[in-house]
Image: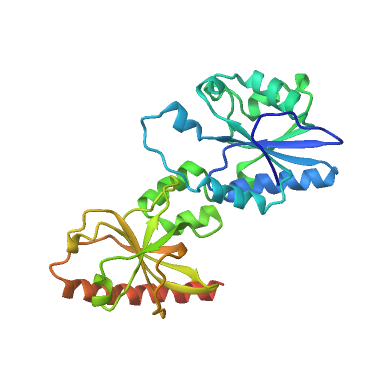
Amino acid sequence: MKIIRDSSFVENNRYNVCTVGYFDGVHLGHKKIIERLVSDAKKNDGKSILVSFWPHPRKVLYPNDHFDFIQSSDDKFKSLQKFGIDILYLIEFTEEFSKVTADDFIDQILEKKLKINKLIIGYNHHFGFRREGNFKYLAGKKDELSFSIEEVKRKEISEKLKISSSEIRNKIKEGDISKTNQMLGYRYFISGKVVKGDGIGKKLEFPTANIEIRDDGKLLPRDGVYAGFTYVSDKKYYGMINIGFRPTLNGSERRLEMNLFDYGSEIYGESMEISFLKRIRDEKRFRNLKELSKQLRVDKIETLKIIENEEVRN
């Protein structure tokens, strides 16, 4: 996958097919569109072009609002690369660019710079100033366009689920990891470096890997206890994940830590990618460490049930 960041011109040697969007999360709906894009390019012996933006439009249009992503930019690029896209065409989203009309975007980007033969977009995609451009808008201008258009309809993506990046972000914030994973088509994950903690988990016989979260704007799920897994030296380990302030210990900072089952070595300084399976409970304040330890044993039993169901499905 070639990445073009400077809004330069793309040659059309035979056939260029394109799709447009931010693609945060590269979820099941995105997957359907991208697979259609790549398949169409191969069928016509042409090039597949995915147009995306950086930073996210909301970061520019609403700079005072807090906004996190489903994926970091690196994660997104890795996800897109797996599909076999020929060109990732990145446009810098600025205040000036936000005022580009749908007509100008079609003329300046799609027709002049990318020289496309076909545009494939999802049923709910909008583009241009005030989001005036969509499939209905394009269909109304069909006779004026130099390229054909194709819509990936909602029922082609999912008959039951309304899948969108905004809906997935809401589910992550709610802690509904089961629904999040269903819409993503993969397990939601957080990456970071293992750092030294205060050793309380070890005293409770539940030692944890404390994760220093990368400052990449990725969304952290709602505070609570989750079942999940990670890989250490290419071996898969299941365990319990806790996100929150550890109220029983009067914690003052939000932390992410994981108790890995059947793992006893030190892993300080290692990078770790933690995948979430299911939420178990809210974070709670207990009267003392003895009560906390008792609850952790209950949590482990619940986590083992989730893991058993996970392995049956796989």
Rendered location of residue 46, percent (x, y): 82, 41
Q: Is residue 313 left or right of residue 276?
A: right
Q: Please, is residue 290 above or below residue 176 in the view?
A: below
Quadrant position of residue 2: top right
Q: Is residue 83 visible?
A: yes
Rendered location of residue 157, percent (x, y): 61, 48
In the image shown, does 104 or 179 lie closer to the viewer?
104
Q: Please, is residue 237 above or below residue 57 in the view?
A: below
Q: Is residue 145 left or right of residue 264?
A: right
Q: Please, is residue 201 above or below residue 165 in the view?
A: below
Q: Is residue 305 left or right of residue 84?
A: left
In the image shown, does 243 or 282 lie closer to the viewer?
243
Among all residues in the image, which is located at the extreme left?
287
Rendered location of residue 266, percent (x, y): 39, 74
Q: Is residue 158 visible?
A: no
Q: Give me the residue at 56% from left, 22% from top.
A: 97
Q: Which image quarter holds the C terminus?
A: bottom right
How many marks are shown on the rendered structure? Answer: 0
Identify the image's colour scheme: rainbow, by chain, secondary structure or one colour.
rainbow
Q: Give me the residue at 64% from left, 41% from top.
A: 153
Rendered location of residue 72, percent (x, y): 50, 47
In the image shown, does 67 or 32 lie closer to the viewer?
67
Q: Give me the residue at 76% from left, 32% from top.
A: 10
Quadrant position of residue 202: bottom left
